[in-house]
Amino acid sequence: MLRPNNLTPAKYPPQSNPLKRLDLLVGSGFEHMRQDVDVRQWGFSEGVFTLKHNYYHQLKFQLACRETGRTKLFEIYGSGAEAFRGRKLGDEIDGSCIGNDFRDYIFKIRGASDHLGTCYTPGLIKYGTSCILRRPGEFGYRGWQAKRKGERRRIKLKGCILDRNLRAVSAIIIRKGALEIPGLTDSIHPKTLGPKRASKIRKLFNLSKSDDVRKYVVKREVVICKKKFVKGVKIQRLITPERIRRKAQHLKQSIQRCVKRKMEKDEFDRKFKSLKQSKQHRHPRE
């Protein structure tokens, strides 16, 4: 960690109480940092300048691997955090700029937020915040907040360019490096919840229509009252013999109703025609 040349750490008299010494180092406004053990260590070893620099330049980096289905959270300080500033959402970044553990890796930035928790808006190529017209349902404007149909509002949004207030970044692995990342790329996390629809299960496992879908349901073990049970989803739209029989029965009943209506209509027409002829025979036109 580099310290500015024109700044030197202040010298304070020795204190027996370590927390009091920490208060002298960090000054006012940093009382919440007393609970952090790492911050105490930095404060005692490097001084107030390194302590405040590390606190304001720390970055939470969430990395996801699609091949293994795992995510891991890292805390980055110093030059590793500075590598993200000035970039945009959707940019690809070399892992060697962040640290030696990510050498030969390539990451893609998918999301970020600042120190206030405000997320950066994808597609808004702008540095800082600006008021943008948004329709209901677009990014930053929820659909249920609309008062009238077709209205638009000016929403204060943050651009997609990462600035100095960056505090959290989420990215995915585009290209894997030579070294394995423990807890991320070394093991595969199986899916706990699989698809429910029968056609979706066939598509996932590349099954044919003759294969039994019930054998490929994703199941998991749960503990209920200190007993282990295996749970799985109920398959929807599953074609069973009972469903085929019920559908054939409904079709048969529908055909019977159609035949009955046709027979009743023919009987009505026959009776109406005979009644009309009898009336004409009784009262012929003069």
Image (cartoon, grey):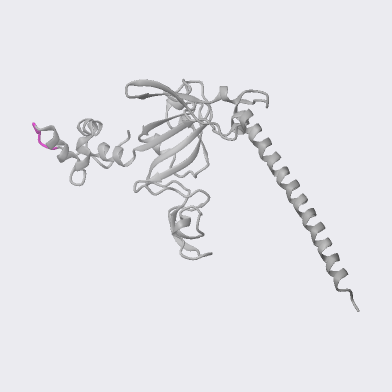
Percent coordinates x, y for residue 46 in the rendering:
24, 32
Whether residue 223 appears in magenta in the rendering, the answer is: no
Q: Classify 49 as above or below 173.
A: below
Is 268 situated left or right of 106 in this image?
A: right
Which residue corresponds to the image point at 80% horizontal and 54% vertical from the top-left?
Answer: 266
Viewer-nearest residue: 132 or 54: 132
- Tell me: 264 left or right of 216: right
Left or right: where 76 falls relative to 195: left
Prevailing secondary structure of the magenta residues: loop
Q: Position of residue 248 (x, y in %)?
A: 68, 35
**Vertical position of residue 117 compared to residue 64: above or below:** below
Residue reaching furthest left? Answer: 16
| Residue in the image at 63% along x and 35% along y | 246
236 is higher (above) or lower (below) than 205: below
Q: Nearer the viewer, residue 8 or 279?
A: 279
What is the number of callouts on the image?
A: 0
In the rendered image, residue 255, in percent from the top left (x then y), is placed at 73, 43
Camera-nearest residue between 145 and 59: 145
Furthest-bottom residue in view? 286
Horizontal side, residue 67 vs residue 10: left or right? right
Q: Which residues are magenta?
A: 12-16
Work out which quarter of the rendered image holds the C terminus and state it: bottom right
Q: Residue at x 72, y 43 (%)?
A: 256
Quarter of the picture containing the N terminus is top left
Q: Position of residue 150 (x, y in %)?
A: 53, 64
Indicate the quadrant where residue 166 lies. top left
Instruction: Give the camera-side residue of 229 and 37.
Output: 229
Q: Give above or below for 70 relative to 125.
A: above
